[in-house]
Amino acid sequence: MERRTVPDRRSHARGASAEEPAAKVDPPKPEQVGVVGAGTMGAGIAQVCAMAGLQVVLVDLGLEQLQRGQAAIAASLARLEAKGPLPRPANEITGRIRTSTAIKDLAKVDFVIEAAFEDAAVKADLFAKLDAACSPAAILASNTSSISITKLAAATKRPTQVVGMHFMNPVPVIAYVELIRGLQTADATMARTRELAKALGKTAVESNDSPGFIANRVLMPMINEAVFALSENVGTADAIDTMMKGLNFPMGPLALADLIGLDVCLAVLEVMQRDLGDPKYRPAPLLRQYVQAGWLGRKSGRGFFPYGAK
């Protein structure tokens, strides 16, 4: 009678073909980052990237904009150094930032952060140009505070590699960044973006791709209502801000609007009103009037409060 042998399944399970669960490996942080726009936000983003030890290519349309951005970075580093030691010498930080007026100089970067003016058409056109100029593996991020990431991604041939990375002003000081996933943004793109935020020392908060995202969906109506209150003589600018600070806000809404830029506040509210279709986001007429007058806040020397000539 033939005996049949039964394989030892326990022995097989312990054999060479068995695989241990793979350890979780964080995606690599980029070595070289491109920043497009040398204004307040772009300069701040370039600074924190360089402070984190990354090489940065800062791109803007003209030398004057780039020089202003470099001056803003130098001044910011001096302020930070007065409060405590920097992570590396200031001259090393600024030495990590290369400037250019040509988008083609972003061809070798791993990650691009766009920080142009808050205008959907301008940003979409810029994303199409970045898509053509950057390496196929590069991630394209927008610092937009309200515009659809899905819409910007549609201007490219790499929608899975487009993401929102909304920094807060002042970038070197505020420890949070909002990450926005577009309709087609890949998980790998989100993972690499989270890793960059971590390398920059930022706490990443993820938002869905809805107008205003989380931060401005909540913040801008408060700022707008403060402007309405000012225009209706409910209180002076100082009284409104003092009262809100009494409610444990670190800064009053009108002073915060001046810091953000009244033109930016207006642009965000217009996006939210149009895309959400709700009249509660209608910008206060006084806000629009200040922008028309060129009273944009701190950057122009006057907003709801005076800051001296610029």
Image (spheres, grey):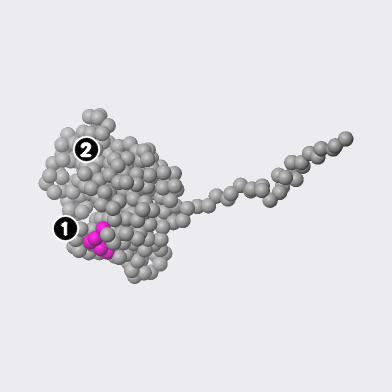
Q: Is residue 238 left or right of residue 194?
A: left
Kindly identify the residue that appears in the image at 27 percent across and 44 percent down.
155
Q: Position of residue 215 (x, y in %)?
A: 34, 41
Task: Characterize the local packing of mark 1: few (<14), some (14-19) or many (20 or more) Cα atoms within 10 angstroms.
Answer: few
Residue 283, quarter of the rendered image? top left
Q: Is residue 152 magenta?
A: no
Q: Position of residue 40 (x, y in %)?
A: 26, 55
Q: Amino acid at mark 1?
A: Lys
Q: Amino acid at mark 2?
A: Glu
Q: Is residue 100 magenta?
A: yes
| Front in this rendered view, residue 127 or 91 | 127
- Label 1 sits on residue: 310
Residue 36, quarter of the rendered image? bottom left
**Vertical placement of residue 5 versus 277, above or below:** below
Q: CA distance from mark 2 to mark 1?
A: 27 Å
Q: Residue furthest front?
A: 1
Q: Quadrant of the N terminus?
A: top right
Q: Is residue 22 left or right of residue 237?
A: right
- Label 2 sits on residue: 270
Kindly identify the residue that appears in the image at 81 percent across and 40 percent down.
5
Q: Is residue 250 visible?
A: no
Kindly identify the residue that appears in the image at 71 percent across and 49 percent down.
15
Q: Secondary structure at mark 2?
A: helix
Q: Are marks 2 and 1 in contact (CB under 8 Å)?
A: no
Q: Which residues are magenta?
A: 99-103
